[in-house]
Image (tube, rainbow, N blue to C red):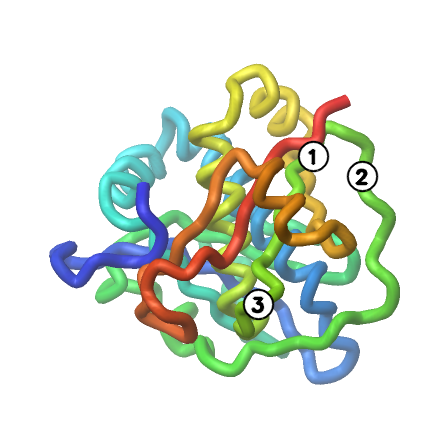
Amino acid sequence: MRPDYDPLDDPPWAMQLVVRAEKSGPPGHGAVCEAAATAVVRLLTDPRAVEGEWREAVREWESRRIRKVTRRARGVRWPEAEALPGVTVEHAGAQVRAFPPGPVSDVPPQLAKLQVAGLDLAEAGEPAPPPEPPYAAIALNPDVTITTGKAAAQCGHAAQLLLRRGRRKDVAAWVEAGAPVRLARDVPWRTCVKKATVAVRDGGFTEVPSGTMTAIAWIVRK
């Protein structure tokens, strides 16, 4: 699995992520990133993705680059998006819905009309305390400036790679706990890199140069 898409993929596929971002009381940047990562894992471990109607789409997508597209919805656009098959996560004031992957040329119209660029949110107050272990810790590279939409996608990549490549016993416990995610905000980046199980290197198609390490992840055990 490789983050973002390869222009040689024909056609490119992506998982759509939709963030509820109302004008009044928008969610915080970190909460959106954490919710997006959890939503990706919950969709990929949903029975519909493991052995049901989403299985073949997930397998096809994971054989390519694991591109994710983050969109924002407000007002009536959010319930329209929620009416489509997917998985919604509500976390610390954020709501993010992940949808089964598919060709980028065949996005449902309810999602295609949602804005992609420009989702950049501030932090909303103090972050919530970390969950009880096990949980996934994700660190974003502090030397890389990216929007909330891009960061949410990168956290989704990191969580997905951790799901697929982490130690089986630890991953199973994390998923059973609901796949909680916590951004590692107060740990030095170099320390995080030493702890990391997986690293995301960007394809370079939006916001950052190709090969940039954007996010890393590991599981915090009991």
Residue 76 shows in the view = no
Taking the spot 70% from the left edge, 61% from the top edge, the residue there is 30
Residue 145 shows in the view = yes
**Left or right, residue 168 beside residue 96:** left
Q: Amino acid at mark 1?
A: Tyr
**Helix, strand or loop under label 3:** loop
What's the CA distance linking mark 2 and mark 1? 7 Å
Mark 3 or 1: in front is 3
Please name whichever residue, 8 or 12, is drawn nearer the observer in this view of the structure.
8
**Residue occupied by mark 3:** 143
Taking the spot 73% from the left edge, 68% from the top edge, the residue there is 28
Where residue 15 appears, as percent x and y from the top left, is 39, 54
Please name whichever residue, 73 or 66, is drawn nearer the observer in this view of the structure.
66
**Residue occupied by mark 1:** 135
Q: Amino acid at mark 2?
A: Pro
Taking the spot 80% from the left edge, 70% from the top edge, the residue there is 124
Query: Total marks drawn?
Result: 3
Label 2–label 1 contact, CB within 8 A: yes
**Residue occupied by mark 2:** 131
Q: Quadrant where the C terminus lies?
A: top right
Rendered view: 142 above or below 49: below
Q: Amino acid at mark 3?
A: Asp
Where residue 215 appears, as percent x and y from the top left, is 53, 53
Label 2–label 3 contact, CB within 8 A: no
> Which image quarter: residue 218?
top right
Q: Earlier in the sequence, mark 3 or mark 1?
A: 1
Neighbour tally class for label 1: few under 14, some 14-19, many 20 plus, Cα within 10 Å: many
Where residue 4 appears, as percent x and y from the top left, is 33, 57
Q: Quadrant where the N terminus lies?
A: top left
